[in-house]
Amino acid sequence: MGDGGFRREQIGFSRGKNFGKKGAADIAGTRGTVFYVAPETAGAGHPPEKADVYSFSVLILVIVAGRRPIHMQGSAMKFDRANLVSWCRKLSQAGDNILDIVDEKLGDSYDRDEANLYIKMALLCLLRTPELRPDSWDILKMLKGEMVIPVPPLETSTSPAAKVLTRSTGRN
């Protein structure tokens, strides 16, 4: 985040905290923000790089969808839509219409190109690997139309990369 003079400040939006010089939080709880938190934030004593980018993208999806990031609906048919981030990722990976997440109350009275831009930008910011997420300057360029939104790489696992284990035969 930046201040009025465009100087960078460490703000933990995703954790609802403002981190001081030593990385200590000013407030203790994260109540109400759990689904905005980047996966790598769990257990971190400091604000991880690009965690705010992840949180910002969840906020964008919440605005576009007109709902909370987690929403249990009465119908079991809609259970796959309960987690907004997962639902959006599934639509994108399956090649389905990502505009399905747009708030139903809008009907046809919204700019499809603009909604598509926001959703694709959010998907790029939701990448599980922080190094692959754009930085805030790139997000600004995308939103202004000064930068083409790259196609996000396909991420198939929420687990960290596995180490390849080999068995020793005991022979040298």
Image: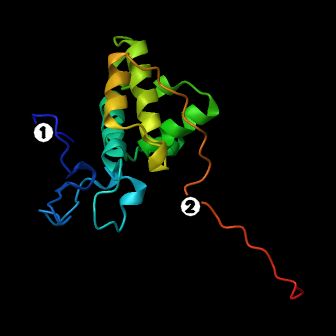
Q: Position of residue 17 (x, y in %)?
A: 18, 56
Q: Is residue 128 above or below residue 169?
A: above
Residue drawn at 62 percent across, 28 percent down: 95
Q: Position of residue 101 (x, y in %)?
A: 44, 29
Write down the residue under mark 2: 160
Outermost residue on the bottom side: it is 170
The amino acid pointed to by label 1 is: Asp
Write down the residue under mark 1: 3
Cα–Cα gap, marks 1 and 2: 34 Å
Q: Position of residue 156 (x, y in %)?
A: 62, 48
The amino acid pointed to by label 2 is: Pro
Residue drawn at 19 percent across, 64 percent down: 29
**Residue 101 visible, this angle:** no
Q: Is residue 103 above or below residue 1?
A: above
Q: Is residue 132 above or below residue 157?
A: above
**Quadrant of the image containing the N terminus:** top left
Residue drawn at 23 percent across, 49 percent down: 13
**Quadrant of the image containing the C terminus:** bottom right
Q: Position of residue 120 (x, y in %)?
A: 46, 28
Question: Which of the two labelled residues, at mark 1 and mark 2, occupies the earlier sequence position?
Answer: 1
Front in this rendered view, residue 164 or 29: 164
Q: Quadrant of residue 63?
A: top left
